[in-house]
Image (cartoon, helix red, strand yellow):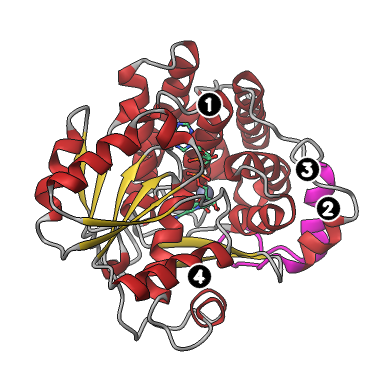
Amino acid sequence: MKLDFTYYNPTTIHFGKESLSNLKGELEQYGETVLLVYGKTAIKKNGIYDNVIATLNEAGKKVVELSGVMPNPTYSKMLEGCELVRKNDVSLILAVGGGSVIDCAKGISVSAYCDDDPFTKYWLQFQPVDNKTVPVASILTMVGTGSEMNGGSVITNEETKIKAGRVFPADIYPKFSILNPEYTYTVSRYQMVSGVFDTMSHLMEQYFTGDDCNTTDYLIEALLRSSIDNARAALKDPEDYEARSNIMWNATLALNTMTGLSKAQDWQVHMIEHQLGAYTDCAHGMGLAAVSLPYYRHIYPHGVDKFARFATEVWGIAAKGKSKEAIAKEGIDALEAFCKECGIVTSLKALGATEEMLPKIAESTFILEGGYKKLTTEEILKILKECF
Ligand code: NZQ
Ligand code: ZN
């Protein structure tokens, strides 16, 4: 563990079939008014909404609602929530949904009492939070982002076409998150595999860096193997509790900052996907998968030892008699074959991109330095063309 680190994660996790029973007790710590933030139709169809409302009523809370939070949540939707917080003196923001809903809730928390333009201040200039904030908690219904146990908030400014992510400090992490794997049974196959790839991408963004192979890398390999095996099991039987619960916990562990410890970290695939999402509104995990394959084929010569290790340790590829390059390539081929097997979409056209969008996506992508190769805008455009 060559790089020093400080690790702290303040989120309480209630996990399992009966985890909602902890909600009433948790609510006792907060004041009268709760802002319930949720998506479009899912939680009303599958009964989660009714169960949560019943508990809020039992706990004697006044409930204000922000519904219709969309995938790739927009800045204007987030501002609607800010207005509700100010008007109603909200003391807890309870997000019930996937990453989009939880990210929107965190955005509302830091922005409701911000006197400047919050998007510029917090998502573009990464300034520290110096205004009053409102506690956030979550009930997770769609798995992949890890937002339930981290400070991440990704908001899309629909006017400027910038999808920007920001990691907020510990007091913006959810105070508690309720994770009931059964809540994910109604998630479509498309969204489920998109979430699995998102988890895998978080792990790979933290794995493909540096020349170290420390404990974090061993943890990542285990979580990748578990994600692959359990995705296969859940595709066979969407109500396989063991599989759904493993997928859920893998996603949380993949981005609760534990699997980034003592690592440089890449995140270039996420930067490209964010701009792809801003232009196409595609499902986050699908966009990541499309970009990952040509990106890894482009950079693996600069980190060939790690890519070869990925092939043998994650995909079980036999190494005997082969060059490191050949093994590394087989690992990326195995990742591609897994995407096909699961029905993960890896073509930008199929995700709604047009040829004219590609230069705009490339030019607006934030370029990072933590990976094996710092890309140029021209290289990003080449990668985008390869998965078009
Ligand atoms: O709108 P509803 O009707 O709720 O439907 C949602 C939505 O259409 C549906 N869904 C959720 N729970 C369901 C369900 N459908 C059936 N049954 C259920 N139980 O799923 C759809 C997608 O939901 P969404 O929240 O958009 O998905 P996800 O969790 O993948 O979140 C994606 C967003 O998170 C950001 C992404 O960029 C994207 O904006 N990310 C956040 C991160 C973080 N906070 O750390 C990191 C990630 O890398 C990522 O960037
Ligand atoms: Zn992601």
- In this rendering, position of residue 178 left or right of residue 377: left
366 within the magenta span = yes
Quadrant including the C terminus:
top right
Q: Which residues are magenta?
A: 364-388
* Mark 1 and mark 2: Cα distance apart in space: 32 Å
Q: Is residue 281 magenta?
A: no
**Disc with the residue nearer the chain's start (1 vs 4):** 4
- The answer to whether mark 1 is within 8 Å of ligand 1 is yes
Above or below residue 134? Residue 151 is above
Question: In the displayed structure, does residue 41 sit left or right of residue 304?
Answer: left
Which amino acid, mark 1?
Ser
Tell me the kind of residue under disc 4: Leu
Extreme residue toward the right, this view: 356
Answer with the quarter of the image where residue 348 lies. Answer: top right
Of helix, strand and loop, which one carries label 2?
Answer: helix
Q: Give the Cα distance between marks 3 and 1.
A: 19 Å
Whether residue 31 can be seen here: yes
Q: Residue at point 44% right, 44% down?
A: 98
Q: Which residue carries the number 4 mark? A: 79
Q: How many marks?
A: 4
User: Which image quadrant for residue 155?
Assistant: bottom right
Q: Position of residue 342 (x, y in %)?
A: 59, 22
For the point 47% across and 23% down, the residue is 231
Q: CA distance from mark 1 to mark 4?
A: 29 Å
